[in-house]
Every structure is written in C-alpha cells, then in structure tokens.
C-alpha cells in the first residue's frame, strides 16, 4: 500500500517545477524569455524615474555543448530608478515580491519576471546572480542565489562602493543555459519592436557572436505615467471583495463602496446596494460569505456605475507611436503612416485603449513580402508568438473586407496594434496572444477601420497619380509621332510644336501630388 | 498605248495624293493652333450601318465620330492612322503597291505604333478609307491574291512598267490571278456576253477544261470562297460598265448563299464604299430546289448551318422571293450539297446538263 504524502510547496518551488508556463519551456525560448523579462524590468525602472532609458544588453557564450544548448552570460544595465539596498535581495530572490501589485498598467504583473529568470539560470548552471544597483547614493553589489524550497534570497556576498559619478540604475548579470542560434531572429525582432513602442529608449544589444545591434531613440518625450486607481465594481471577484472587507476602515456598506471602488458615488452606491438587497448601513465586517457572493454578482449586472477610469492606462499616444514606427520601419516622407489612438473603452470592468498604426508604401514593400504583416503589442510588450490564434489576427483577417480599402492580396501592409489595459485578456499563461473578448475585438476592428479609411484615400490618390502619370506617358509617346508624320504627310520640314498640348495634359499632376502629401494629417478623428 | 487610260489613272492617283496630304495639313495646323488634333469620319459601328434598298447594298448612316487625340483611348489608333496615311502616300508617290499584310509588317520597328496584329492594321486601313472616302486600292494597298479570272477579255495595264500593254485573259489556262495589275487595268474589249462566278477552284478548273467559256460565251471568275473586294469590283465593272449579266454559282448551303449575296449586295464591312456591289447579279445555284430536282448526294445541315440560315432569313438583303423560298426549303429538308455533288452524274454533267438548264431558266 502506498502512502500519500501531503506537503505544501513554496512559490519558487512551484515555478521550478512548472517553468514552462513562464516561458522557459526550451533552451531557445529560455533565452528569449530571459532577455524579455530583464529588458522589461529595466524599461519600467526608467519610466518610473522619468528618464529616457539607456539600456545595454549583452549575451556572451561561456561554454558550448554538443546538444546545441550552451551556457551563456546575460548582462543588462539600465539607468532606471535603482533599488534601495535593503530591497535588492527580496526583489530578486523571492517570487511574488514587487512593486507592481497595484492596479495600474505595467509591463509585467506576475512579479516574477526577474526572479524566474534568475531561478532558471540557477537551476541550469548553479551559478549565483550578481545585482549592482544604486538610487543615487552608494553602489551596492550583491552576489546571491535563491533558496528555492523556502522562497527566500541567499546572500553570498555584499559590497558597497562609493558612487563618485552619481550613477543611478541597476545591473543584473547571470548565467543560464540556452540556445541562441535558433531564437536569434525572433530576439532581434523582439528588441526592434520594443524600440518601436518605446521610441524614447536607446537599446544596445551585443550578441554572442559579438555583433552589435543599436536601436537609437527617436525622441526624449515619454508618455505620462499612469496613476494607480481603485478597481471598478464590474471587474472585481469574490476574493478581492473579501480582502477589501477585511482591511476596510469604513463603517457602512455605502461608504465602503465609495471608498474602495471607482465609479461609485452617493446615489449609485445606494441604488446598487438596493439592487443587491443589502442595507447601506450594514457594517462591512458583518457581511456573511453569501452576501459577498451576492454583491459581486449584483455588481456585474448593475449598469449605472461610471465607466472605468482610464487614467490608470498609459497608451503610447499617436505622436510617440508614429515616431517609433517611422524609425524602426525606416519610413520616408513618401510612405503612408496613419496612427489612431482610440478613446478608452471597457470589458468586464477593465478599462482598455486600442492604438493602431498602418504603414504602407515603397519602404514597406521593400522590407516585407506582399500581404499584411501584423505587429502586436500588449501594454507595450511585443507579442511574437501564436499570431493566428489572437484577436488581432481575427480582426484583420476575418472581420475586415480589405478590398473595401483598396488593399488586395499582394499589397504590402504593416499593421501595428497596441492594446493597453489593467488586465490584458491573455488567453494562456504564456501571455503570447489576446483572447477575442467581444469588446476588445470590436475596438481593435474599429481602430483598424479608422486608419484604413485614410489608407484607402491615400491608395486611391496614389492610383490617380499613377494614372495621371501614365496618361502623360501615353501622350508623351504619341504626340511626337503625330507631329512627325503629320509634318511628313503634308510635305513640311518643321514639326509642329506639341509642348502646349503636353502642358495641358500634365496640368493636374502637381495638384494631386500636393494632396497626397497632406494625407496623414487629413482625417484623424475617432469615430 | 491609249492616252485616255493613262490620263484617267493618273488623275485618280493625283487626287488620292492630294487627299492624303490634306489630312496631314489638317492635323498639322490643328497642333499649331494648340488644339489636340482630330479627324471627323462616318461611324462604322453596327448601329450606323443601314441597308439601302435603292442601292441594294449596305451603306453608312449619317452619324459621324471624331477620332480625337485628346482621348486616351483614341490617341494610339489616331497615331497609327496618321502613320498609315503617310505610308499610303509614300506608296502612291513611289508607284508601289503593297498588301494588307505588308502594311502590318512595315509598321514593325515604329516604336509604340506598331500593330498588335494584322486585324488591327486592317482596321486602321479601313478607317483611312472611311476618312478619305476612297477604297484602299486607290492608295495601292491590295489584299492577298487568291481569286482568278479567265475568258475572252482584253485588258490594258496601268501599273508602272506595263503602261499601255495589253493582254487577253484566255492566254493563261489556269486563269489570271486578280492582283493589283488586273484590278487597276482598263477593260478594252470582250466577246463574252455574261460572267459566270464560281466559288471553288476545282470547279473553276473543270469549267475551263470543259471550255465552258466558249460554250456559254462567258467570262469565268473564281472567288476562292468569300470574294475579295478587288474581285467584287471587277464583277461590278463588268456588269455596270460593260453590261454583262452576272451569274453566281456556289455550294448549296448557307455559306455559299452568302458568298453570292455579298457579290450582289455588298458586305456590312464595306458599307463605306461604292462600286463593289452588283445588284443585278443572279444566284443560280446550288439551290435547295436543285438538291431535290437533281437528287444530289447531300450532307445533313449542322446546328451551325441552321443557325446561320435563320440569321439570313431575317437579313434585309434576303427579302427577295427566291431567297426566302430557298432558305425555307433548306430548313425543311435539312440537307446541303456541294458543287462537286454533280460529279455523281459524271464529270461533264454540270457543263453539259445542269448549267445550260439553269441559265435557260433565269
């Protein structure tokens, strides 16, 4: 007879056993995820500090193996806010520890991006991680490992040095097993797309073969920081509600609703509680579990709350997105680019904003093959995998009839879609594609159509110009012949002057060309 | 050599030359006046082709069109027309003749205006005919030669190098090819009192061999299928200027009937031209009635034949009683017969029996 052993495991232990859900499923994917987690942490650190990021990334091969899976050293340096010395061990040595567990848009929300990377490095190489950080004062350097079983940091060394140059930022250096050669193009694409949505960042990447990839910033401007907000009643679940009940200082349910949720005011609080059949004067602490369930269900149904507050969102904005895309897709003045930032919208109580950019023109058809190339971002993170499962693919390929916009199978087009939200509707834990939430799907579709209407105008004007040029070509070809043979036919030496006729034909061309140049600023309204 | 002949053909040549030059003048001055050049001409579209019962042929209606170089779709054919006019004038100057096919090839190497196929260049030449109101033979462009003439007719050439020379058309037993030289020649004298037109080469040869020209005192003309315009013009001249009645002898099927009809009433394609139709010409066979009377070996009419017969039945040129009657009988018996069908009764039967009977009857 077998004996069943019951035990609890620490979060570190859990991720150790299930590392594929965090994106470390195979050696090449591990490299990708490690870079991604550390790069995003660095970008966040700079944004909090309001400094345009200067990020240096280096991947060095330390030892090769025959299986294709090598040992690499990964080093990242940023000029972000830095970490207070006493927080460093926990931030990097403990899973689910961080500053992001509040309700505002941030790149990662598992709070384990950095830590899981370190954890993965440790279990594949058994080497410690080095963290160097300063918030302006002394520079602290930690050498540490993670105590996986107990989910706590294991400090191996701590040195403090004077910070003469007033450096601020963080350096993380770790070793990990992986396979760079297979993920190379995706990784470069990932950094390129990151540069696209963070046009204020300069990113340098040195790859294991010593090649340097430099993504220069195109602006110093940064989007405003999102503010932290209370949850909206539509998006709250029983557990979150219970937690608020347990910590609240309010004395009755009416003030409780107003204090802890957004979009709730005096009258809507009263009306809502009435609809939930709860007395506004009830003490929160006296609620029974079934009352909480009742309240959460009623909250989902109640429709008179104010719309969720989008101030916790940080869209890139039309100007910055345009800068980023122009620079990374190397667009010229002659190419078409339309960026649309939609008004905030909500799904299931979560606010979200959709931004779309459509690029078209010679530069695009040179770089991409015919058809629509999709670039996806969620909270300013590029999504590179499982494209055809996501809502963006569906909106573009299923819901839109492109011939309406004069786009046909061989038209080269790049469509970038950014969805930002306090909760991105990821479909899987791998966070690689967004589910087709009806509200999100509709907004993505509207944003694309919005931009595509401009595209149609542009394309039809381009067609007209091409048409006019062809006309001129034809007249330019035949009129001289008519002149030549009419002269010969009538026994004349001199040919008649066709210049005035050619001028008459080409008169309309500059007009159309001027119009096409104006295009991107013509219509920009949200609708 | 006859002064009259040379003067007549020379006058014709000069007026053709002048009218071609006139087109050049018009276009030249239009451009000088800062105007996109254009040429006005009668429309050749089907709704402008009408049957004139008086003339017994198709003519162009009153609608005119402008071929305008301002129109992006017209400028290429317009340019081709100016080129073709120039080419035609060169031919007239140099006293050279050319064929439709040669014109098509001569444009080769003229970047941007060369013709995509012969049908395109043929069309442009027809446009030029319409614009100038002259047949292309006037500007020395002839079709490929394939039809022939035989019999006692003396002609006098007008072509360079042969001016004034005469020839009798019985001189060559295969018949004389109807080419530019015959077409442009003057007919001096003939002892024949009728013209016998035959659709097929084999039958033409048989008639020559059997001395049908003597027996019937006739000129024999072989059309080789649908007769070329030069041949129709010769038939027209023999009938109109020399008073010879014309008898046409074709296969007994809708296509044969129509070969006869085009000789008699002209074609829609040549509605802009006069002097091609011979309204007094008579179709003498093979009739549907003949198939019954002579018990000719037959083939069944195909679907295509039946469709064509029904089209002919409603064609205004086929209003006459004979036509309607024969078409009805064809439709009724569902049979057709070729000229060669008479061979059933021996090779000479057609000359000895059939033709005399038919000529007697009409």
Image: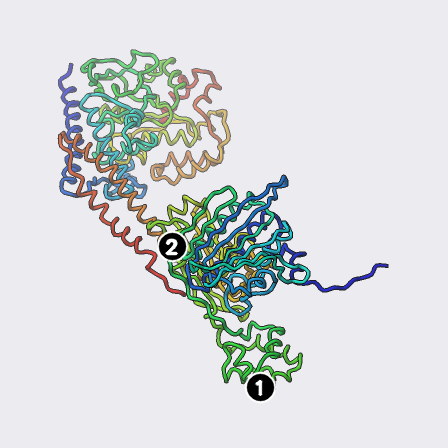
| Lateral position of residue B31 relative to residue B172, left or right | left
Parent chain of label 1: A
Position in image of residue A522 (x %, y %): 32, 59
- Disc 2 to disc 1, C-alpha distance: 52 Å
Visible residue check, residue B230? no
Q: Quadrant of the N terminus of chain A?
A: bottom right
Residue that carries the numbered disc 1 in the rendered image? A251
Q: On the picture, is A73 further left or further right than A498? A: right
Q: Check disc 2: other Cα within 10 Å, few if <14, some if 14-19, many if 20+.
A: many
Q: Position of residue A130 (x, y in %)?
A: 56, 55
Q: Residue A82 at what x, y percent from top left?
A: 49, 62
On residue B208, which mark appears?
Answer: none
Of residues A337 and A394, which is closer to you in this image?
A337
Q: Nearer the viewer, residue A163 or A210?
A: A163
The residue where tag 2 is placed is A218
Same chain for mark 2 and mark 1? The answer is yes
């Amino acid at each position: 007879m077998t004996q069943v052993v019951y035990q609890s495991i620490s979060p570190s232990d859990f991720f150790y056993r299930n590392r594929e859900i965090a994106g470390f499923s195979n050696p090449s994917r591990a490299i990708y995820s490690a870079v991604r987690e550390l790069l995003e942490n660095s970008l966040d650190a700079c944004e909090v500090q309001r400094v345009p990021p200067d990020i240096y990334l280096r991947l060095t091969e330390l030892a090769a193996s025959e299986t294709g899976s090598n040992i690499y050293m990964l080093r990242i340096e940023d000029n972000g806010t830095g970490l207070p010395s006493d927080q460093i061990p926990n931030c990097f040595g403990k899973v689910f520890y961080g500053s992001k567990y509040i309700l505002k848009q941030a790149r990662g929300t598992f709070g384990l991006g950095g830590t899981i990377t370190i954890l993965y490095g440790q279990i594949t190489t058994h080497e410690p991680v080095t963290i160097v950080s300063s918030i302006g004062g002394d520079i602290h350097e930690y050498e540490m490992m993670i105590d996986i079983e107990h989910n706590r940091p294991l400090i191996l060394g701590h040195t403090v040095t004077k910070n003469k140059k007033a450096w601020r930022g963080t350096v993380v250096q770790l070793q990990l097993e992986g396979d760079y050669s297979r993920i190379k193009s995706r990784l470069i694409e990932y950094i390129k797309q990151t540069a696209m949505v963070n046009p204020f960042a300069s990113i340098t990447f040195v790859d294991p073969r010593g090649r340097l990839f430099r993504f220069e910033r195109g602006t110093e401007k940064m989007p405003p920081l999102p503010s932290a907000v209370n949850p909206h009643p539509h998006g709250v679940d029983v557990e979150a509600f219970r937690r608020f009940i347990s910590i609240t200082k309010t004395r009755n349910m009416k003030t409780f609703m107003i204090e802890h949720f957004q979009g709730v005011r005096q009258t809507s609080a009263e009306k809502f509680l009435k609809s939930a059949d709860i007395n506004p004067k009830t003490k929160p602490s006296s609620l029974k579990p079934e009352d909480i369930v009742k309240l959460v269900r009623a909250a989902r149904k109640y429709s008179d709350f104010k719309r969720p507050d989008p101030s916790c969102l940080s869209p890139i904005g039309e100007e910055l997105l345009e800068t980023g895309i122009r620079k990374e897709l190397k667009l010229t003045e002659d190419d078409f680019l339309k960026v649309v930032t939609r008004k905030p919208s909500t799904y299931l109580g979560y606010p979200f904003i959709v931004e779309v950019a459509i690029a078209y023109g010679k530069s695009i058809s040179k770089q991409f093959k015919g058809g629509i190339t999709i670039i996806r971002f969620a909270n300013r993170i590029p999504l590179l995998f499982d494209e055809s499962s996501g809502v963006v693919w569906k909106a573009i390929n299923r819901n839109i009839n492109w011939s309406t916009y004069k786009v046909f199978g061989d038209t080269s087009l790049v469509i970038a879609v950014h969805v930002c939200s306090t909760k991105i509707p990821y479909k899987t834990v791998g966070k690689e594609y967004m589910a087709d939430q009806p509200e999100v799907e509709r907004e993505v579709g509207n944003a694309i159509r919005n931009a595509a209407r401009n595209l149609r105008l542009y394309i039809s004007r381009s067609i007209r110009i091409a048409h006019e040029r062809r006309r001129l070509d034809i007249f330019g070809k035949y009129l001289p012949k008519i002149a030549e043979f009419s002269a010969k036919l009538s026994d004349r030496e001199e040919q008649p002057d066709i210049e005035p006729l050619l001028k008459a034909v080409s008169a309309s061309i500059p007009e159309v060309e001027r119009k096409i140049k104006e295009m991107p600023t013509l219509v920009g309204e949200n609708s | 050599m006859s002064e009259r002949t040379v003067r007549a053909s020379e006058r014709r040549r000069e007026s053709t030359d002048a009218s071609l030059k006139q087109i050049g003048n018009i276009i030249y001055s239009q451009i000088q006046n800062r105007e996109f050049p254009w040429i006005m001409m009668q429309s050749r579209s089907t709704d402008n082709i009408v049957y004139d019962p008086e003339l017994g042929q198709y003519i162009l209606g009153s609608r005119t069109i402008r071929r305008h170089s301002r129109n992006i779709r017209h400028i290429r054919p317009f340019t081709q027309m100016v080129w073709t006019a120039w080419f035609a004038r060169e031919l007239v100057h140099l006293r050279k003749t050319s064929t439709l096919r040669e014109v098509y090839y001569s444009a080769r190497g003229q970047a941007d205006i060369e013709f995509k196929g012969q049908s395109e260049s043929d069309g442009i030449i027809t446009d030029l005919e319409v614009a100038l109101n002259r047949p292309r033979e006037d500007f020395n462009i002839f079709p490929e030669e394939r039809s022939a003439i035989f019999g006692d007719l003396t002609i006098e050439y007008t072509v360079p190098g042969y001016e004034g020379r005469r020839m009798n058309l019985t001189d060559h037993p295969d018949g004389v090819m109807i080419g530019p030289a015959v077409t442009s020649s003057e007919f001096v004298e003939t002892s024949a009192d009728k013209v016998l037109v035959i659709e097929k080469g084999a039958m033409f040869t048989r008639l020559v061999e059997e001395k049908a020209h003597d027996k019937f005192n006739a000129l024999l003309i072989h059309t080789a299928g649908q007769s070329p315009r030069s041949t129709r013009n010769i038939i027209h001249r023999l009938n109109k200027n020399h008073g010879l009645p014309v008898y046409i002898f074709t296969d007994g099927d809708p296509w044969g009937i129509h070969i006869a009809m085009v000789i008699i009433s002209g074609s829609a394609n040549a509605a802009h031209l006069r002097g091609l139709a011979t309204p007094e010409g008579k179709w003498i066979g093979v009739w549907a009635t003949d198939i019954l009377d002579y018990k000719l070996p037959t083939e069944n009419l195909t679907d295509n034949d039946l469709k064509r017969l029904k089209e002919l039945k409603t064609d205004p040129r086929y209003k006459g009683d004979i036509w309607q009657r024969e078409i009805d009988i064809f439709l009724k018996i569902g049979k057709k017969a070729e000229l060669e069908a008479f061979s059933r009764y021996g090779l000479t039967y057609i000359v000895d029996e059939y033709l005399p009977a038919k000529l007697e009857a009409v």
